[in-house]
Image (cartoon, grey):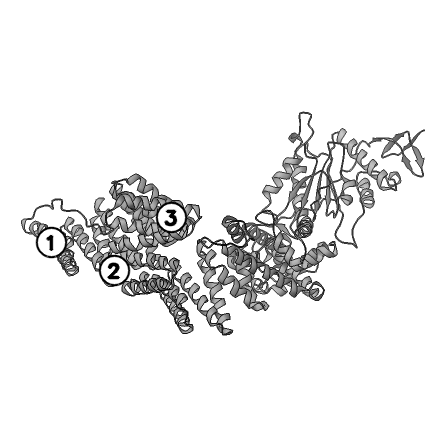
Amino acid sequence: MNAARVDAATSNTITGGIFFHAVVQGRDITVRLPPAITPALSGLPAPDSAFTGRDRHVERLLADLAPAGGDAGGQRAVLVSTVSGLGGIGKTELVVQTATRALEEPGWFPGGVLFTDLAGYDPARSISPERALEGLLRALAVPGEHIPGGLEDRQRLYRSVLAAYAREGRRILVVVDNASTAAQAGPLLPTDGATAALVTSRHTLDGLGARLHDLDTLDTAASLAVLDRALRHARGSDDTRFTDDADAATVIARLCAGLPLALRIAAAVLAAAPTRPASSLAASLQAEHTRLDKLARPDRAVRAAFDLSYQHLTPGQARLFRLLPLNPGPDLSTDATARLGDTGPDRAEELLQQLAEAHLVEPGSSWGRWRMHDLVRLHADEHGRAHATADRRDSARTRLFTHYQDTTQAADTHLDTLPGPRAPRFPDRATALHWLDAEHPNLTATAIAAPALGHPATTVSLAFSLARFLGLRRSFDDAITLTTSALAICRGGGDRHGEAQALSILGNALGDVRRFEDAIQAHTGAAAIYRELGDRHRESRVLNNLGNALGELRRFEEAIHAHSDAATVFRELGDRHGEAQALNNLGITLQQVRRFEEAVRAHTEAGSIYRDLGDRHLEGTALINLGGALVQVRRFDEAIDSQARAADVCREFGDRHLEGTALNNFGNALRQVRRYEEAIHAHTRAIAIYRELDSRHGEGQALGNLGTAFVQVGRFQEAVSAHTRAADVFRDLGDRHGEASERGSLGIALVQVGRFEEAAHAHTRAATAFGELGDRHLEGTALTNLGGALQQVRRYEEAIHAYTRAAAVFGELGDRHGEETALEAWAVTHNERWLGRDRRPGAGPADGR
């Protein structure tokens, strides 16, 4: 049967079908377009002038839309692209901006653009595919009486019309906005192989065969630009409240968490009150419990946008969504989610993936980790509090915290460097460290939040179990925060053992950030408690750590006494490991008072004990310290071997900071046997490690040693730079002794480049500091070098005075070599002064390093 209906506007020729009311149904459809129709461009919303921060996304979408992006026949490889993301993330604006740009490209879409908003997440406004097709067909100039009544027939006619437009060189871009499912959007997509489409959804619609684009939040710079542009658009270019108060604008951007909807609402709130300062809005958004209320305008609100997504969740998805904010940290693993939701890992992963498809959670830094947008988290927490009883919210939090406690304790057993049993939760040290690294932010956040949530025991447990890990990763600020909180809890509960343990851990962390007076106070308090409790073993451990802090403050005799007492008690109790630790620390202090032979014996004995016990990691520390002492007694080859072995051990255990120390000392030993280029390489590697770890003190030490190596190879300008940077580091750290040492070394380098006045100034500062610090040996060295610099600029009287003082210092110390060097230089200077001759080359600078 053949049938035809002719209209002044559009003609449809159908063959092999039937005539049904005002509609023609058939197997084959031929559409003849009228000579001229109104392009379907009027439905596209106007682009927002505040749009920014999405250039990369626009370019990617345009590349997919470009006609030249396909095969040799001109067909594009990508015909349909979907943009998915959280409600309010800016999906619609992105496709509107992209469509506007595409329409401006000559020849891309001469037929215009079709735009339809399916309102897929609002039950009261959601549009069915049938209804949407009716609107699209009308926009394509198909008369109402020609539009079929069923989905399938409307879809066939719609796609045929689009194909006809494309064949006649009037290709159209279809934009389907706010689709909730693939079933809602699918019928609206072209299938002619030429017409392109853009689709937006809060879900990842992977059933459309489309190119998927996920939209993330804006960074701080783009967020600030959105705020400023939106305000100026509303109030005019003279309204500069956001740029005038950059701090307040940054706070608002942070609290809006890069969500364009929230940013535009914040700008609209400020625009509605032309005299309100940005700082007032920033202050009002600070309170979490009212933030979503403040981010609302009569026509739009962040909470309402999120509610539309929440309403589409199944009961299981909604329950997990409400529980996720119970995690105090920034993200959550699948395993932790399973504990939180009291379900298995497979079910937890399934629910998380479904929430991710709805863009209510996002994949974290690696697979198996998940995070929430800050404002979504507040929204989920509001619903969670409303359903607290039904969700058994308190039990869920307890399960999560118990999981963190138990797993941290298991991981900590693998950080013990002594051989012995380990918790089976992890197969090896590397796996345990990987878990701790991934969970570090969550664990510290949980420990900090737990007391206010009724879980103080969690804080104490995590503070103690994380101590070894935080020390290894040099997260000293976290260690101080956690143990300070644990200390208050133990004191409040009358737990004396816990109080002493917290003080001991706190003392170590304070020492690591060079707060040595505070560290001494903490260790002294811990030792007193253990003494009161009769716990000699733990008291000795604290005394050993106390000795370290005393040594850093150059209270060497007290430090030697503390380490020696600790070693004696450990020996009496049969704790060989503790004895080795005390001996190793004793050796370090002995080096400080130049008792190098005794230091070599102490480090050698410590290393032997560690080796016998199988503790390779701490054997590495003993090797590092032994190497330093061996250099001082001129056993250079042994020192080089010791440091090289130590560096290998540190790498094996992933201890980057200790590896840097080994490399730095390795360079010192290499310099002694004139292997200067290798030494420079070792010091440079050490500096890189210290900078990577933000270890300023280690960086300063390595820079100073590098400068000395540069002097020894005649690279004097580089030496000046290295010593200057090292002195600045120590000055910033408040380490007067380290700064003074570098001022002295800087003075030596400055002499070599002829900057004698600067050299004299550097040596003067060094000598003054060493004198005030009581380091008589280095004070004498600095005075000798000061005399040399002054002699070079013919300031003979001052030079003679410096040499005289140096000789007196060395004489008091019984250092005959230093005294003779100073007196010989005094004699040469005295002769030059009276004979008026130019200074001949003398004995050279005294090396105080």
Mark 1 element type:
helix
Crowding around mark 2 (Cα neighbors within 10 Å: few <14, some 14 to 19, many 20+) is many
Along the horizontal axis of the image, is 479 left or right of 74? left
Q: Nearer the viewer, residue 733 or 446?
A: 446
- Please report whichever mark, 1 or 3, sits nearer to the chain's N-terminal start: 3
The amino acid beneath tag 3 is: Gly
The residue located at (40%, 47%) in the rendering is 649
Contact (Cβ within 8 Å) of mark 3 with mark 2: no
Q: Nearer the viewer, residue 106 or 758?
A: 758
Q: Nearer the viewer, residue 640 or 277?
A: 640
Location of residue 340 by image quarter: bottom right
Q: Is residue 21 above or below residue 499?
A: above
- Please report whichever mark, 2 or 1, sits nearer to the chain's N-terminal start: 2
x, y percentage for residue 796? 12, 53
Q: Quadrant of the N terminus?
A: top right
Say if residue 311 shows up in the picture.
no
Q: Is residue 516 above or below residue 843?
A: below
Along the horizontal axis of the image, is 771 left or right of 190? left
C-alpha gap between disc 2 and disc 1: 23 Å
